[in-house]
Image (cartoon, rainbow, N blue to C red):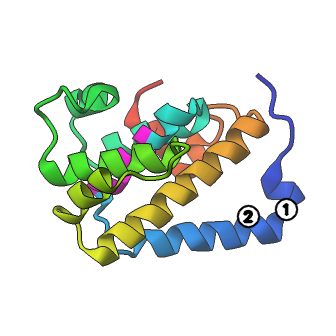
């Protein structure tokens, strides 16, 4: 695969602002392990290999158990996820694959039992950001693993 456009070089101002947005999300109310799960699940749903590769490596480096990573695509059937994670993953899926009729009240009510309004809001910004990154990397055919050394992801030893 060859990258179509290097968006970092072509739009450096926008890229810088987008990274600032991502860094602000990291300082929000959603804890890092849950951010990792949400980012991985969003990448799976979008079919973004670049993002999936990066987020799995980040999660592994940050201590996520491999079995949970393997189960993530089937989280509904797995016993490895707590109710808070399940609620966040349901919210992630419905926002990533928006139904024509919008977000069902049932899903929102389930999420409200596990997350505060601030957490739901911050989670929504995380899902928005991850979806946007997927669109950049899918559209421009970013090569999975191409930035591993820059971000220290080669230390995950998953190549």
Separation (CA) of disc 1 from disc 2: 6 Å
Residue 107 falls inside the magenta stretch:
no
Residue 65 can be seen, yes or no:
yes
> Which residue has dot 2 on it?
15
| Outermost front residue | 101
Rendered view: 99 above or below 87 = above
Q: In this view, does 133 lie above or below 2?
A: below
Residue at the spot x=79%, y=38% of the render?
140
| Above or below: residue 116 compared with residue 48 | below
Q: What element carries label 1?
A: loop
Q: Position of residue 25 (x, y in %)?
A: 46, 70
Is residue 39 covered in magenta?
yes
Point out the stretch of residues depicted in magenta. Answer: 33-41
Asked whether disc 1 touches disc 2, contact meaning CB atoms under 8 Å apart, the reply is yes
Give the percent coordinates (x, y) of residue 119.
31, 71
Asked where in the image residue 21 lies, by quadrant, the reply is: bottom right
Q: Residues within 10 Å of mark 2 (few under 14, many from 20)?
A: some
Front position in the image: 112 or 145: 112
Classify mark 1: residues with Cα within 10 Å, few (<14), some (14-19) or many (20+): few
Residue under label 1: 11
The residue drawn where x is 51% and y is 45% is 96
**Placement of the N terminus among the 4 image quadrants:** top right
Task: Identify the residue at image location x=62%, y=44%.
Answer: 134
Question: Residue shown at 86%/42% (left/top)?
Answer: 5
The answer to which of 12 and 112 lies nearer the viewer is 112
Mark 2 falls on what kind of element? helix
């Amino acid at each position: 695969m060859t990258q179509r456009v290097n968006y970092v070089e072509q739009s450096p101002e926008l890229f810088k602002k987008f990274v600032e947005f991502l860094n602000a999300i990291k300082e929000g109310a959603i804890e890092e392990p849950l951010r990792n799960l949400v980012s991985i699940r969003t990448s799976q749903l979008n079919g973004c290999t670049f993002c999936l590769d990066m987020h799995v490596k980040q999660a592994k480096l940050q201590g996520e158990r491999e079995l949970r990573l393997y189960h993530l695509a089937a989280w509904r059937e797995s016993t490895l996820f707590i109710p808070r994670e399940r609620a966040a993953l349901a919210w992630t899926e419905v926002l990533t694959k928006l139904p024509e009729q919008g977000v069902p009240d049932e899903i929102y009510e389930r999420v409200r039992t596990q997350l505060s309004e601030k957490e739901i809001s911050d989670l929504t910004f995380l899902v928005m950001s991850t979806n946007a990154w997927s669109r950049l990397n899918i559209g421009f055919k970013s090569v999975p693993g191409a930035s591993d050394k820059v971000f220290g992801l080669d230390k995950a030893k998953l190549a």
